[in-house]
Amino acid sequence: MDNPKIPGSAHSWESGQLGRDLQHAVPSTPELRAQIDNALDMQLVSLRLPNELVEKLLQIAHMRGMNYQPLIRHVLTEFADTTLDIQAKG
């Protein structure tokens, strides 16, 4: 039985038409996750937030067309950069 081919394109991958079939998903190894974190200069942080705040962040992220974790990174980066800039000037 032949499987129909879906033309590959950036749009096909980004839209999820290609690449999101859980049947073919394989979890990454802890070593690979560590390599990715190192390459991206990222550190896993566990943080407890009030449910109401998480819901608000999810709503804002959805309105901006993004996931809430990148939104939180953006908000924290802006806060840290602004605070340090003000401190340096003051």
Image: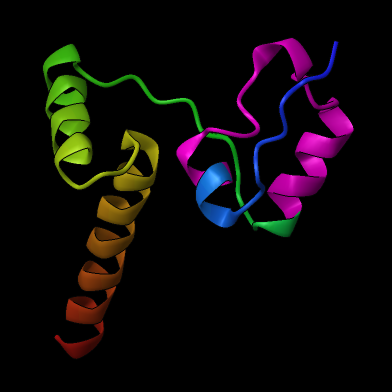
| View extreme (bottom): residue | 89
Picture layout, residue 47 above or below residue 14: above
Percent coordinates x, y for residue 53 in the rendering: 15, 25
Q: Does residue 48 show up magenta in the picture?
A: no
Instruction: Tally the numbered discs.
Output: 0
| View extreme (front): residue | 1
Q: Quadrant of residue 79?
A: bottom left
**61 and 4: which is toward the camera:** 4
Q: Residue at x 88, y 34 (%)?
A: 31
Quadrant of the rendering where the C terminus is positioned: bottom left
Q: Residue at x 14, y 30 (%)?
A: 59
Picture layout, residue 90 above or below residue 26: below
Q: Quadrant of residue 85?
A: bottom left
Q: Residue at x 74, y 53 (%)?
A: 38
Percent coordinates x, y for residue 84 in the rendering: 28, 73
Percent coordinates x, y for residue 83 in the rendering: 21, 68
- Asked if residue 79 lies left or right of residue 90, the reply is right
Percent coordinates x, y for residue 18 in the rendering: 62, 34
Picture layout, residue 7 above or below residue 28: below
Q: Quadrant of residue 51?
A: top left
**Residue range corresponding to the magenta coloring:** 13-38
- Asked if residue 8 lies left or right of residue 12, the reply is right
Picture layout, residue 65 above or below residue 5: below
Q: Residue at x 55, y 44 (%)?
A: 12
Quadrant of the rendering where the N terminus is positioned: top right
